[in-house]
Image (cartoon, rainbow, N blue to C red):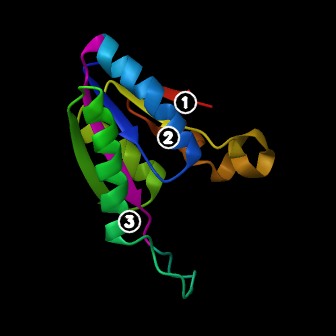
Amino acid sequence: MFKTVLFPIDQSREAREAADVVANVVQKYGSRLVLLSVVEEPSAEAQTTDPMVSSEVVAKLLANAQALFSQLGIQVEVLERQGKPAFTICDVADEIAADLIIMGCRGLGLTEEGATDSVTTRVINLSPCPVLVVP
C-alpha cells in the first residue's frame, strides 16, 4: 500500500516523536523510507547576522536519524535539500513517487495566525500524496 514513505525531519521534538510512527508504518508495509532535511534559504528582506543551519548540523541530524532506523533493521535513503520547506517537501515527494508523507506537527496551525505559517498545513494542501500528521 505504501511503497515509498517520505519523512521530512528537523530538530524538533515532534519530528523525533513521529519517528516511532514512521518505523511502524515502514515495517508493517515493507516500505522504502526516504529521510529529507530541508535547509531554508534566507530571505532577501531578512537581513540577519544569525547563520543558517550549518551543513554539519544537518549532516549530524540525518546521521542520527539514519542510525535510529538502522537499529530497527530499516534501510534508509537520505536527502538534503535547500529551499522553502513545504514546497521542497512536496517537490521531493513527487520526485520519488512517495505514497505517503509522515511528519510531525508543532500545533501552530491551531490558531488563525499559525494556519498561514504552518509548514504542515502547506504540505497537506500541496502534497501529491496522502500526508499523515503526527501530533
Query: Which numbered tag is attached to residue 133?
Result: 1
Residue 11 percent across, percent down from the top left: 49, 54
Query: Which numbered tag is attached to residue 16?
Result: 2
Judging depth in this view, the residue of 107 and 14 nearest the camera is 14
Who comes first in sequence, dot 3 or dot 2? 2
Instruction: Based on the picture, tell me whether residue 34 belongs to the magenta stretch.
Output: yes
Looking at the rendered image, the disc whose residue lies closer to the viewer, 3 or 1, is 3
Looking at the rendered image, the disc whose residue lies closer to the viewer, 1 or 2, is 2
Q: Which residue is at a point 28% across and 42% down the rendered structure image?
A: 67
Q: Amino acid at mark 3?
A: Val
> Within the image, what quadrant is residue 72 found in?
top left
Residue 51 percent across, percent down from the top left: 47, 80
Tell me the magenta residue range. 29-41
Judging depth in this view, the residue of 69 and 82 nearest the camera is 69
Q: Residues within 10 Å of mark 1 (few under 14, many from 20)?
A: some
Q: Residue 40, relative to residue 130: is it above or below?
A: below
Q: Amino acid at mark 2?
A: Arg
Q: Amino acid at mark 1?
A: Val
Who comes first in sequence, dot 3 or dot 1? 3
Residue tagged 3: 57
Q: Secondary structure at mark 1?
A: strand
**Labelled pair 3, 2 in contact (Cβ < 8 Å):** no
Q: Is residue 31 left or right of residue 124?
A: left
Q: Residues within 10 Å of mark 2 (few under 14, many from 20)?
A: some
